[in-house]
C-alpha cells in the first residue's frame, strides 16, 4: 500500500510527572504492528519533573511520528478533551495513559474492529486490560463484559477504560462540540455514553494492554468480582458516586433531545429526581438501571439509598 494512502491513527496522551514509566509506554506505541500510520501527540499538563525532556528526545528521533504540546495544569479530563477537540484529519483516534504498556497488536485489533462497522456510525472500541505491577506479570484483568451495553448500564457504570478507547472520526466529530469539562468527572465515561447514545460501542473481552497498578496511580482496579466490588465501594465511600451523579445530570442537560428520541430520557430523569429516601425506594421498584452483575447492581442501589450516589 502506498504510504500516502494509508489510514492514520492519532494516539493522544496526556502526561504529568511521568518520567519514570513514559519511555516504555512510548516505545510500545511506536512499535505497534499495524498497517495504519501512527502519530503520537502528547500534551504535557504542566509537569515539574523531566517528562518533557524525555518526550523531546522522541520528537527529535521521530519528528514525523511524535509531537509535544506543553500546556499548563488543567487536569486529566480537560487535557484529554483539549487533545481531542483540537485533533482533525485522522481516521482513528486513541487515548493513552503515560504509564501502561501496549501489546503489539492493540491498535490493529481495535481499528480493524471499527472498520467492520458502517463508517457513517459513530463507533467506540474498548477492551479488557491485564493488571500488572512493575514486574509486568499479569495477575488479573479489568472488568469484562457480562451483560449487554445500553444507556441503562453505561450511564451509571464506567465500563470502557480510557486507556483502551479507540474511536472513528464520526465519534470524534460529536466529541468536539463545546462542553464544560469542569462538570465532567471522568472523560472515558462521558465518551462511552456519547458513543452508546449516538452510535455503537464495541467491547473486546481479550486484553491488549498492561495496565499498571501502583500506589500513586489515579484509577485502580480490583481483581475478580469481589475485588472490583471492593474497589467500587472504596470509590463510592470517597465521594466518587456523587460526582458521577453530577456528571449524569450534565449529560442529560446536554443530550436531552437525543435521550428523548431514543426513549431513555424519562427513566434517567426519574433517577435524578428521586431525591429522598422514599422517592428512591419507589423509583427502584421499577428501575431499569443495572450494572454488569447483580451484585454490583445491588451495591449501586445501596449507595443511592445511602446518598452516596
Image (spheres, helix red, strand yellow):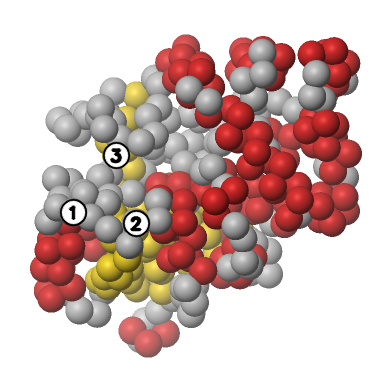
- Indicate the secondary structure of the residue bearing disc 2: loop
What residue is shown at x 68% (from left), y 69% (from top)? 120
For residue 159, which quarter of the picture? top right
Marks 1 and 3 close (CB-CB < 8 Å): no
Q: Which mark is residue 48?
A: 1
According to the picture, the residue beneath numbered tag 3 turns out to be 210
Could you tell me residue 202's position as x and y percent?
Answer: 58, 48
**CA–CA distance between discs 2 and 3?**
27 Å
Badge 3 marks a residue whose secondary structure is strand
Counting from the top left corner in percent of width and height, residue 216 is at 26, 32
Question: Can residue 300 be seen at all in this image of the molecule?
Answer: no
| Residue 105 on image: x %, y % | 33, 53
Q: Is residue 193 visible?
A: yes
**Quarter that holds the N terminus:** bottom left
- Name the quadrant containing residue 23: bottom left
Return the mark for residue 73: 2
Amino acid at each position: 500500500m502506498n504510504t500516502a494512502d494509508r489510514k492514520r491513527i492519532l494516539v493522544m496522551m496526556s502526561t504529568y510527572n511521568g518520567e519514570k514509566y513514559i519511555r516504555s509506554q512510548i516505545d510500545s506505541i511506536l512499535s505497534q504492528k499495524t498497517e495504519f500510520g501512527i502519530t503520537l501527540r502528547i500534551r504535557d499538563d504542566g509537569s515539574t519533573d523531566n517528562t518533557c525532556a524525555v518526550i523531546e528526545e522522541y520528537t527529535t528521533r521521530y519528528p514525523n511520528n511524535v509531537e509535544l504540546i506543553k500546556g499548563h495544569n488543567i487536569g486529566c479530563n480537560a487535557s484529554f478533551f483539549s487533545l481531542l477537540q483540537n485533533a482533525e484529519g485522522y481516521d482513528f483516534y486513541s487515548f493513552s495513559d503515560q504509564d501502561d504498556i501496549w501489546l503489539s497488536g492493540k491498535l490493529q485489533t481495535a481499528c480493524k474492529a471499527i472498520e467492520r462497522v458502517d463508517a457513517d456510525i459513530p463507533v467506540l472500541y474498548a477492551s479488557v486490560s491485564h493488571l500488572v505491577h512493575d514486574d509486568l506479570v499479569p495477575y488479573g484483568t479489568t472488568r469484562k463484559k457480562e451483560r449487554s451495553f445500553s444507556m441503562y448500564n453505561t450511564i451509571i457504570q464506567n465500563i470502557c477504560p480510557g486507556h483502551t478507547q479507540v474511536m472513528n472520526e464520526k465519534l470524534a466529530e460529536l466529541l468536539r462540540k463545546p462542553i464544560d469539562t469542569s462538570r465532567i468527572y471522568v472523560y472515558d465515561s462521558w465518551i462511552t455514553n456519547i458513543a452508546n447514545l449516538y452510535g455503537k460501542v464495541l467491547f473486546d473481552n481479550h486484553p491488549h494492554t498492561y495496565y499498571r497498578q501502583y500506589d500513586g496511580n489515579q484509577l485502580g482496579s480490583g481483581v475478580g468480582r469481589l475485588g472490583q466490588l471492593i474497589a467500587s465501594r472504596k470509590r463510592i465511600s470517597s465521594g466518587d458516586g456523587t460526582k458521577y451523579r453530577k456528571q449524569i445530570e450534565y449529560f442529560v442537560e446536554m443530550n436531552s433531545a437525543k435521550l428523548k428520541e431514543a426513549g431513555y430520557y424519562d427513566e434517567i430523569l426519574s433517577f435524578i429526581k428521586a431525591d429522598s429516601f422514599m422517592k428512591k425506594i419507589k423509583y427502584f421498584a421499577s428501575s431499569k438501571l443495572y450494572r454488569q452483575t447483580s451484585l454490583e447492581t445491588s451495591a449501586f442501589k445501596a449507595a443511592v439509598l445511602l446518598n452516596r450516589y
